[in-house]
């Protein structure tokens, strides 16, 4: 079956005497409107004339009218009109219905990704570094944001067919391990370390910090322990290795609850020796400058501008964070030969990454241009009932607890086989949607009440819609899904859904260009609202078989696209039937 869009494109291409590929970016599906029925596609005359290179062009609106007059309605296009600097097209309703539904069901999880917008896209090797907590320190909200944003970017790139390597670059080296090694010898318990490593190491770290502030001998012992680590002392290293291994085991378990995985757990420790090689290379290129304090710096401005000075070595010869990042980037290029490397951290590190990329460039690495920092804003005020967030697990437990309370208040928990897991998945959807609604760069004040508000545009609403549509398929599916008559889907509610489904590829394209998940979030929320309205008006029960079958196909297509979008965002769609009765009170 030829897609109506391709037919439409070839007609336009003939009339306008332009190759179809020139038209693809000038044509878009029209966003649906609550107020009035809209056309299906619009051709941007502005964008078309830019490609034409004719600078003596008359008034855009006149051009739009001329174009509209040139074009004829046919078996594909049933109506042509002009809008503000556009030519609008309405597609034959039966053809629209048939091809959109067929495409959604045939393409399945690939719907929208096979679009002409992505054709000819070269398959790339992409490294995404995200999450990156510090062993024995707090897993703060910045790490949580990095985790869910990085996961979204990796999911999207993978869905587009790229080879993605997900790296968690742990803070697993530095003076904190001197303190931790000394602290563990003083206050550590092996059984506590085995049963809850992250919690126990954090407690030891807090306690030894207090001691070191009051007792100089503890501070000295910590320095000596770190020096032993730097010199490769076997005993010190084996204790450090144990801390690291047990922490990673625990992280893997907690990330699994979040639905996140990594291909590689790297860390600053990997680059102790390699960062020395970086220093030698900087020195050999005459870029390393020694300061009076004995530290080594690189002047990126070349004229002594203090804001462009980057410190790369301490006075005792040990490396710093920036040096280790340089070593890591060089090592990853050798190992993966990536086309793009994306770092997902808060915007406070923007200058750091600018300097790292600039240093790579002046060291002679042209591929520095392939490195990219995706910054995000700061979240204030995320607290759990136990106080400030210390561990990722605190956040997950809080989500589960609050969601269970919400569910208990509307008496759904008795109907669910696994209320804990349901609460966690739905709660995570609520947290992710709340975080992804705005621009990633924006700071915002966190509020649990807003995350779990019972009405409006929330992750709870998306999960509920998906579950409800799934239950429709389970209830009626077998008998009705064999064949359907497209003529039965001419109601405005059906047409609005079909028009919205047409736009999914454009939304994916937008998010793939600017890494902002909000385009997909907004699209899915609108889709859920349209489905809610249609669910009320387009009855399946007691309708004639061909009407019921057609409506069921429509709802199945909505659920499929909803699930695709949710998975890209890092949300596991819920498929329980029993949630539906009680949940309707929540949305």
Image: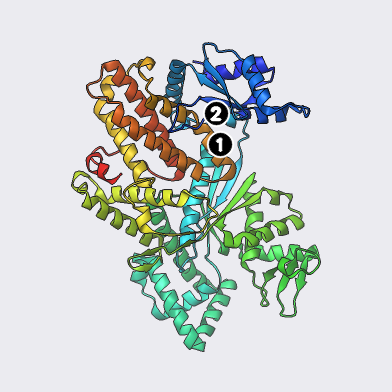
SS at mark 2?
loop
Q: Would residue 161 be visible to someone looking at this image?
A: no
Q: Is residue 481 left or right of residue 275?
A: left
Q: Quadrant of residue 501?
A: top left
The location of residue 494, given as percent across then percent down, is 38, 25
The residue beneath circle 2 is 115
- Residue depicted at 38% across the width and 15% down the height: 487
The residue beneath circle 1 is 509
Q: Is residue 503 left or right of residue 404?
A: right
SS at mark 1?
helix
Is 181 located above or below residue 395 in the figure?
Answer: below
The location of residue 402, given as percent across then percent down, is 30, 56
Q: Quadrant of residue 232?
A: bottom right
- Residue 46: image tag: none
Near mark 1 (Cα within 10 A), the count class, few <14, some 14-19 or many ≥20, is: many
Q: Are marks 2 and 1 in contact (CB under 8 Å)?
A: yes
- Residue depicted at 36% across the width and 33% down the height: 531
């Amino acid at each position: 079956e030829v897609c109506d869009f391709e037919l439409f494109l070839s007609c336009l291409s003939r009339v306008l005497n332009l190759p179809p590929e020139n038209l693809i970016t000038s044509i878009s599906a029209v966003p649906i409107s609550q107020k009035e029925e809209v056309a299906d596609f619009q051709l941007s005359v502005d964008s078309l004339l830019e490609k034409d290179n004719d600078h003596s062009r008359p008034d855009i609106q006149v051009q739009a009218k001329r174009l509209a007059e040139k074009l004829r309605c046919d078996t594909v296009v049933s109506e042509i009109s002009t809008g503000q600097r556009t030519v609008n097209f309405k597609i034959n309703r039966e053809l629209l219905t048939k091809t959109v539904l067929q495409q959604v069901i045939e393409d399945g999880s690939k719907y929208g990704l096979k679009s002409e917008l992505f054709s000819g896209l070269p398959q790339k090797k992409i490294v995404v570094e995200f999450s990156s907590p510090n062993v024995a320190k707090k897993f703060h909200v910045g790490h949580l944001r990095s985790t869910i944003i990085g996961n979204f970017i990796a999911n999207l790139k993978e869905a587009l067919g790229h080879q993605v390597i997900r790296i968690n670059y742990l803070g697993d080296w530095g003076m904190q391990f001197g303190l931790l090694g000394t602290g563990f010898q003083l206050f550590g318990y092996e059984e506590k370390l085995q049963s809850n490593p992250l919690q126990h190491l954090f407690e030891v770290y807090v306690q030894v910090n207090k001691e070191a502030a009051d007792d100089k001998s503890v501070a000295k012992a910590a320095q000596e322990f770190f020096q032993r680590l730097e010199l490769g002392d076997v005993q010190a290293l084996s204790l450090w290795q144990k801390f690291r291994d047990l922490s990673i085991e625990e992280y893997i378990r907690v990330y699994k609850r979040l639905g996140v995985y990594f291909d590689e757990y790297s860390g600053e420790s990997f680059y102790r020796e390699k960062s020395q090689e970086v220093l030698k290379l900087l020195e050999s290129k005459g870029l390393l400058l020694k300061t009076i304090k004995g530290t080594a710096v690189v002047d990126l401005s070349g004229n002594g501008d203090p804001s462009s000075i980057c410190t790369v070595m301490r006075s005792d010869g040990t490396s710093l964070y920036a040096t280790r990042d340089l070593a890591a980037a060089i090592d990853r290029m050798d190992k993966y030969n990536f086309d793009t490397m994306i770092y997902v951290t808060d915007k406070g590190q923007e200058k750091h990454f600018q300097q790292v990329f600039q240093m790579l460039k002046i060291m002679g690495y042209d591929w520095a241009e392939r490195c990219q920092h995706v910054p995000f804003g700061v979240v204030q005020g995320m607290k759990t009932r136990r106080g400030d967030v210390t561990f990722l697990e605190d956040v997950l437990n809080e989500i589960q607890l609050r969601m269970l309370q919400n569910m208990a208040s509307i008496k759904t928990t008795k109907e669910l086989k696994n209320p804990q897991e349901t609460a966690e998945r739905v709660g995570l959807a609520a947290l992710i949607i709340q975080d992804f609604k705005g621009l990633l760069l924006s700071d915002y004040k966190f509020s649990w009440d807003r995350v779990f508000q019972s009405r409006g545009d929330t992750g709870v609403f998306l999960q509920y819609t998906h579950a409800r549509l799934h239950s429709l398929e389970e209830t009626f599916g077998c008998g009705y899904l064999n064949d359907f008559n497209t003529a039965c889907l001419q109601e405005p509610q059906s047409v609005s859904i079909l028009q919205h489904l047409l736009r999914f590829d454009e939304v994916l394209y937008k998010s793939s260009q600017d890494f902002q998940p909000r385009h997909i979030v907004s699209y899915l929320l609108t889709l859920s609202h349209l489905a809610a309205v249609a669910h009320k008006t387009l009855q399946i029960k007691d309708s004639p078989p061909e009407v019921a079958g057609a409506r069921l196909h429509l709802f199945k297509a909505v659920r499929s696209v909803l699930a695709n979008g949710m998975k890209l965002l890092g949300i596991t769609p819920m498929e329980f039937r029993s949630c539906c009765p009680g949940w309707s009170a929540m949305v």
